[in-house]
Structures are given as C-alpha cells and as structure tokens.
Image: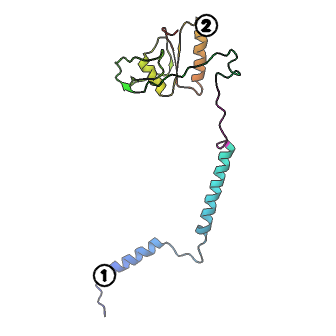
Amino acid sequence: MTLDLRRDRRAKERRTAKGRRSAGPARPGPRIGNAFVRPVIVAVLIFAAVLGLRASGAFDPGPPKLDPNDARFNPAGQVVGVKQKDEGRGHVANDKTVSYGTTPPTSGDHWDTPAAWGSYDRQQPNERTVHNLEHGGIVVSYNGLTPDDEKQLKAVVSQLRSGTFRKILIQPYPTLN
C-alpha cells in the first residue's frame, strides 16, 4: 500500500490539469486539415506571387546599356565622357585642403559633410562636392555660359530634381576650360 501525502496529490493534480490545458480541446475524428490544407495554401500563395512578379516584369531582362557615344545618340561623333582613375574615397576634416588629379575632381579624399543638393550661384569647395559624388549624386559644373544658357541649364536641372533625380548639384566652376 502506498501512502500519498496531500501535497503530492495536489502536485499530481496540477500536472495533470496543466497537461490537459496545453493539449487543447479534444476533436472527434481524424485531423487531416492541417496536414493537407496548409501546404496547399502555401503552394497557392507562392504560385500567385510568382505570377504577380512575372506580370510586373521582375523576371524580364533589363534594358540594353546605352552608349552615349553611339551614332544614334551622338550624330556629331564627339566622344562623350572620359573614364578617370579612382583616387579613393577617404574622409578628412572639414577644414583640410585636398589636391585632386582632375578638374573638376571626380573622386578622392573629401570632407565629412557633403553639400546640400540643389543650385548654387558660387562654386562649392571641391572637398565638399566630391562627397556628393560618393553618395551617388551628379555634380554639374559649368563655365562661360550666356545668361540665357545658364537659366536654361538651371531649369533643366530643376525639372530633373523635381522628378526621379533628386541628387543633383549645379554650380559655376570658373577654372573649368
């Protein structure tokens, strides 16, 4: 004969009651819903996602790369752009002067703080605009334009900035040939 203490019986009752609560209510009959329906739902969702991506063109090849020197875009036959050597992208203090291998500079050490995107009436420090280039922006530098040409260039840049191309900086560059 086994002698059970009251506290042992209560502990056993608590364990049994806890086990019943975690198991959930008993369901009659076989449970095939979870084993069959969930994988079917997942497969249908994946199929719908693939169809949606396909309809949006996500799997289509991208457009061909455009060459600005192609005769279709450049009937005069002038060479557009010259590839420049990468001079690095280190950060220096905002008061340090840096010398560059190109005018205007295309890369190299630069200040910690970039210039704000937009239009300027004076040339910004090279060390600042190179930081804008590091952030994937476009720096348009000009010299020797008539007032009408300058106004037209600023209008084009303003239109570009109000659309998709927000990272554009335009500035006069007096030493530009």
Above or below, 118 against 13 in this view is above
| CB-based contact (under 8 Å), mark 2 and mark 1 | no
**Residue 140 horizontal side relative to residue 54, left or right:** left
- Locate residue 106, reporting x and y percent: 48, 21
Above or below, 105 against 6 in this view is above
What's the magenta region?
A: 56-67
- Locate residue 161, reporting x and y percent: 57, 23
**Residue 110 horizontal side relative to residue 159, left or right:** left
Q: Please state which of residues 18 and 112 is positioned toward the viewer in this rendering.
A: 112
Report how many numbered discs are placed on residues in the image: 2
Above or below, 77 against 14 in this view is above
**Crowd rating for badge 2 (residues with CA inside 10 Å; few <14, some 14–19, many 20+):** few
Judged from the image, the secondary structure of the residue bearing numbered disc 2 is: helix
- Locate residue 27, reporting x and y percent: 56, 75
Residue depicted at 59% across the width and 28% down the height: 164
Which residue is labeled 2 in the image?
148
**Residue 88: which quarter of the image?**
top left
Question: Which quarter of the figure is the N terminus placed in?
Answer: bottom left
Which residue is labeled 1 in the image?
8
Residue depicted at 33% across the width and 82% down the height: 9
Q: Please state which of residues 169 and 67 is positioned toward the viewer in this rendering.
A: 67
166 in magenta = no
